[in-house]
Image (cartoon, rainbow, N blue to C red):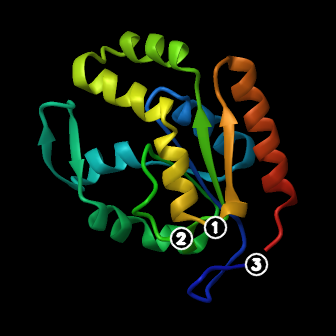
């Protein structure tokens, strides 16, 4: 069983699927959970369902999550293992929670189309495109977790998502603590 930094053991791995909005996190994470029978946790949905936020950000059109409340809410299930966590940020989660951190990457022209289709515009659109262009989330993941557990995967096409789910499923299948 995996031994986290706190000395606990878990029988199944925990994965974080992160990346700029529009890179395919939810599609990838939910397909991976279905393929592996691991628990899918969409942090954005959890924040809304459990009111784990400090209000609404009008400029970006989203909740201002309370990171401490999110971590408190997830602690017990993360210790159990067998989770696939989907969120566009990663630096506030405890390092001991994850055995693999996957950063999804998408070409900016494709990302632009996905985000405008979602209704993103103005500052929200430009900030997310810049975040992807400058690899902010990949850098955040590399700064927050051990380099050997961080993987960047392309997510431009449906075939990329299928290949990513297949390779991650194989990783989970062969995972040993």
SS at mark 3?
Answer: loop
Query: Residue 52: percent from the left, percent from the top?
Result: 24, 56
SS at mark 1?
Answer: loop
As drawn, the label of residue 159 is none
Tell me which numbered mark, 2 or 1, is placed earlier along the sequence: 2
Q: Quadrant of the C terminus?
A: bottom right
Residue furthest out toward the front: 134
Give the number of the mark in front: 2 or 1. Answer: 1
Disc 2 packing (10 Å; few <14; some 14–19; many ≥20): some
Tell me which numbered mark, 3 or 1, is placed earlier along the sequence: 3
Query: Residue 40: percent from the left, percent from the top?
Result: 55, 48
Real-space Cα separation, disc 3 to disc 1, in angstroms = 19 Å
Q: Quadrant of the N terminus?
A: bottom right
Task: Report which quarter residue 32 is drawn in.
Answer: top right
Q: Would residue 18 appear left or right of 165 to someone viewing this image?
A: left
Q: Relative to the observer, which residue lies in front, 30 or 91?
A: 91
What residue do we see at 49% from left, 45% from top?
137
Mark 3, residue position: 1
């Amino acid at each position: 069983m995996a031994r986290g930094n706190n000395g606990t053991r878990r029988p199944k791995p925990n994965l974080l699927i992160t990346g700029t909005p529009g890179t395919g996190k939810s599609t990838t994470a939910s397909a991976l959970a279905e393929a592996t029978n691991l628990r899918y946790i969409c942090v954005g949905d959890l924040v809304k369902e459990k009111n784990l936020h400090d209000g609404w950000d009008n400029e970006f059109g989203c909740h201002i999550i309370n990171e401490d409340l999110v971590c408190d809410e997830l602690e017990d299930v993360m210790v159990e293992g067998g989770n696939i966590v989907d969120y566009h940020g990663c630096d506030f989660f405890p390092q001991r929670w994850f055995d693999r951190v996957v950063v999804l990457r998408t070409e900016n022209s494709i990302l632009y189309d996905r985000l405008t289709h979602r209704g993103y515009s103005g500052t929200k659109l430009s900030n997310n495109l810049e975040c992807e262009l400058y690899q902010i989330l990949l850098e955040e993941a590399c700064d927050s977790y051990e380099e050997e557990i961080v993987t960047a995967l392309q997510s431009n096409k449906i075939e990329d998502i299928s290949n990513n789910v297949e390779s991650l499923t194989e990783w989970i299948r062969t995972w040993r603590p």
